[in-house]
């Protein structure tokens, strides 16, 4: 089965997961693997599958080699997709048949939207983390010329136009390589999250509690809302309470409790590293 949708898979050293991802998008006849200079067999597996591989080197100073938003923006702008619409997916994610069907039906008719969000299901310890997820909706079906990424690490997509939503699940296996890999990865993330926080405080106007709620400009409002969260006392504990009780993560059983604990530890790393960076800046 073919379609009028291109696929963009983001990779670095994903030999463990790439085959399953490729299988889940095999219905498309335009699959692109955008690789950050993998040192394993990721590229070979992708080429054997018939995917178009684009590799780009962008340094080693950050968790995945550089400014992640700039790297992804380069891909959106320079990769020659066959179709107008592109579905963006990570190697540890899988498109479900129902999602594929709904996307194809959706794009069979013209739409005013420039992007669509899908619901992602994160799995841990064999359990769908249905409740404890921070946000289950992610913008993945996009028109590349209408999109750009922001943030140094864990970048977010910003759409130049309206965004719709499509039914169906995108399944995600963040612990497919084991807990050690997840902890190592998030330890790196925490360093760059801290750097992003310090950089934001330098480059933006002073924090305003009022603007966190009434600011009309989306980007400035988001800055003040993030700063509000970053300034909360006992933030790691607050994050645990939000995930485990506020979002009813306890309904996800042991997996939900463990995931909420891991996320609060990750938040504590960010707190410690932000404080450390600010102390260095003030010397």
Image (cartoon, rainbow, N blue to C red):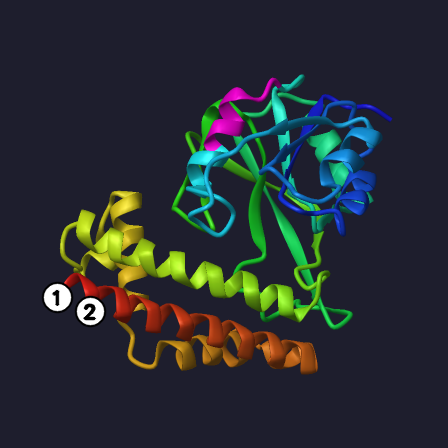
Name the disc covering residue 279, or none: 2
Question: At 42% across and 35% down in the image, what residue appears?
Answer: 70
Q: Position of residue 157 (x, y in %)?
A: 47, 40
Q: Position of residue 111 (x, y in %)?
A: 58, 25
Q: Is residue 197 above or below residue 241?
A: above
**SS at badge 1:** loop
Asked if marks 1 and 2 touch (Cβ < 8 Å), the reply is yes
Asked if residue 118 lies left or right of residue 115, the reply is: right
Q: Is residue 126 above or below residue 253?
A: above
Q: Residues within 10 Å of mark 2 (few under 14, many from 20)?
A: few
Residue in the foreground of this view, choosing between 9 and 251: 9
Tell me, yes or no, if residue 113 can be seen here: no
Q: What residue sits right under mark 1 in the picture?
A: 283
Residue 118 among those drawn in magenta: no
Q: Position of residue 180 (x, y in %)?
A: 64, 69
Residue in the foreground of this view, choosing between 234 and 37: 37
State the image quarter where residue 11 is shown: top right
State the image quarter where residue 226 is shown: bottom left
Question: At 76% across and 52% down in the image, what residue appears?
Answer: 16
Name the disc covering residue 160, or none: none
What segment is highlighted magenta in the picture? 73-80
Asked if residue 127 lies left or right of residue 154, the reply is: right
Of all residues, the one furthest to the right in this rendering is 1
């Amino acid at each position: 089965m073919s379609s009028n949708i291109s696929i963009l898979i983001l990779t670095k050293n994903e030999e463990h997961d790439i085959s399953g991802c490729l299988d889940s998008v095999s219905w498309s006849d335009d699959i692109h693997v955008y690789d950050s200079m993998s040192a394993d067999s990721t590229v070979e597996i992708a080429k054997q599958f018939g995917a178009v591989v684009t590799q780009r080197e962008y340094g080693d100073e950050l968790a995945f080699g550089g400014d992640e938003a700039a790297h992804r923006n380069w891909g959106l702008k320079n990769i020659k997709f066959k179709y107008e619409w592109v579905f963006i997916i990570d190697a540890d994610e899988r498109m479900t048949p129902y999602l594929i069907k709904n996307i194809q039906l959706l794009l069979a008719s013209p739409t005013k939207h420039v992007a669509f969000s899908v619901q992602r299901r994160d799995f841990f310890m064999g359990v769908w983390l249905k409740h404890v997820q921070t946000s289950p909706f992610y913008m993945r079906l996009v028109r590349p010329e209408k999109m750009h990424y922001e943030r140094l690490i864990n970048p977010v997509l910003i759409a130049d136009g309206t965004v719709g939503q499509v039914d169906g699940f995108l399944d995600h296996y963040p612990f497919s390589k084991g807990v050690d890999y997840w902890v190592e990865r998030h330890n790196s993330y925490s360093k760059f999250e801290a750097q992003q926080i310090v950089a934001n405080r330098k480059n933006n106007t002073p924090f305003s509690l009022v603007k966190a709620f009434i600011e009309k400009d989306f980007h400035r409002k988001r800055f003040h809302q993030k700063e509000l969260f970053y300034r909360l006392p006992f933030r790691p504990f607050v994050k645990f309470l939000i995930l485990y009780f506020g979002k009813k993560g306890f309904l996800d059983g042991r997996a939900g409790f463990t995931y909420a604990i891991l996320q609060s530890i990750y938040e504590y790393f960010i707190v410690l590293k932000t404080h450390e960076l600010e102390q260095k800046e003030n010397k």
